[in-house]
Amino acid sequence: MTAPRAIILDCAGPALSPDERAFLRDADPWGFILFARHVETPEQVARLCGGLRDAVGRDAPVLIDQEGGRVARLRRPHWREWPWMSAMRAGLAPEAMDEALRWRFRLIARELRALGVDVDCMPMADLPVAGAHRIVTDRALGDTAEAVGRRARIVADALLAGGVLPVLKHLPGHGRAFADSHAALPRVRASLEALRETDFAAFRPVADLPLGMTAHVAFDALGGEAATVSPAAIRAIREEIGFDGLLMTDDLAMEALGGGMGGRARASLAAGCDVLLLCNADRAAQTEALAETPELAGAALARAEAALAARRLPEPFDEAEAEAEARHARIVEALADA
């Protein structure tokens, strides 16, 4: 039996066409990712997840970015809304925010499992500096390495308890970026020693997680290339931070990376990434990336198998109690919306 290809793909809309089903069957990606355009109703999302897995004939992971607040693919009226992290940090005492995060992500995991989604792209352990781009500051878990690392563990444990695998992002750190990597390549000029004491320190408490995602950020101290395509940055992720899980790229279609899609795919794998993530790309770009994407093998295959082996059934859970315990987060949401 052949191994799946080292790539995660999406589809065009809320249902698979026969052509897409055939394309995905032949492409055989390791997993899939959903966006807002894939989401209409709970029943529809569940059908789509089932259809994606049927296309490849196995229980492939289905990912989503469901942080709540600024980044949320599931929204009203069918799913809970949550305050932005920046509002929580401003409106809650540290201990209250810790507890609110615990229940928030336990409830998010409940919603995802009901749909057939089994991977959430959280926690985000990026440590923002003063003046960093809002793409990070609005979503950051805290403003010190200790707080970010502690809360990243809370988020990850809550997701795992709910039967959902967490993805640690964005390694080795996006918090010093003064640009949005969706549109441009941020450059960080901090020394390696400064990175060790701050950015890397925020990730180390959760370096044992089974899945991680790179940052499209260039670090002068790590060779000056975007981390996703930088052998030096991937070494720092593995050796300085100690992350040994399956490492996926951030979306290869983002404008931070230059060159054609085939070149981006080839450079990411050569740098040491295990799996490519390609989102919001047309068929031509998908085909170009797939031409450079091998089947999973060696250490990457072992990490992929270990990640999927970490999937488990949810622990017993009282949803009504969780709703009550999450009331502080809802209070912040009401204030933020006022």
Image: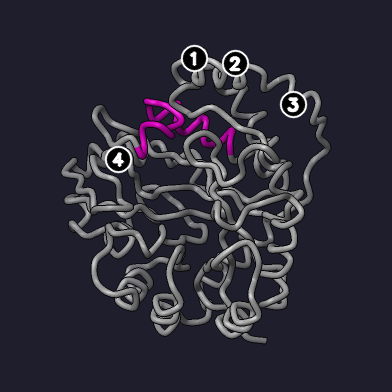
N-term mark: 1 or 3: 1
Say which amino acid is labelled 3. Ala
Amino acid bearing label 2:
Ile
In the displayed structure, 82 sits above or below 301; it is above
Q: Nearer the viewer, residue 89 or 285?
A: 285
Q: Which residues are magenta?
A: 135-155
x, y percent for residue 317: 81, 34
| Residue at (62% x, 21% y) in the render | 330
Residue 46 percent across, percent down from the top left: 74, 57
Q: Are marks 1 and 2 in contact (CB under 8 Å)?
A: yes
Residue bearing mark 1? 91
Local packing at callout 2 (Cα closer than 10 Å; few below 14, some 14-19, many 20+) is: some
Mark in front: 4 vs 1: 1
Crowding near the residue tagged with mark 4, few <14, some 14–19, many ≥20 C-alpha atoms within 10 Å: some
Residue of label 3 = 322
Labels 4 and 2 touching (C-beta < 8 A):
no
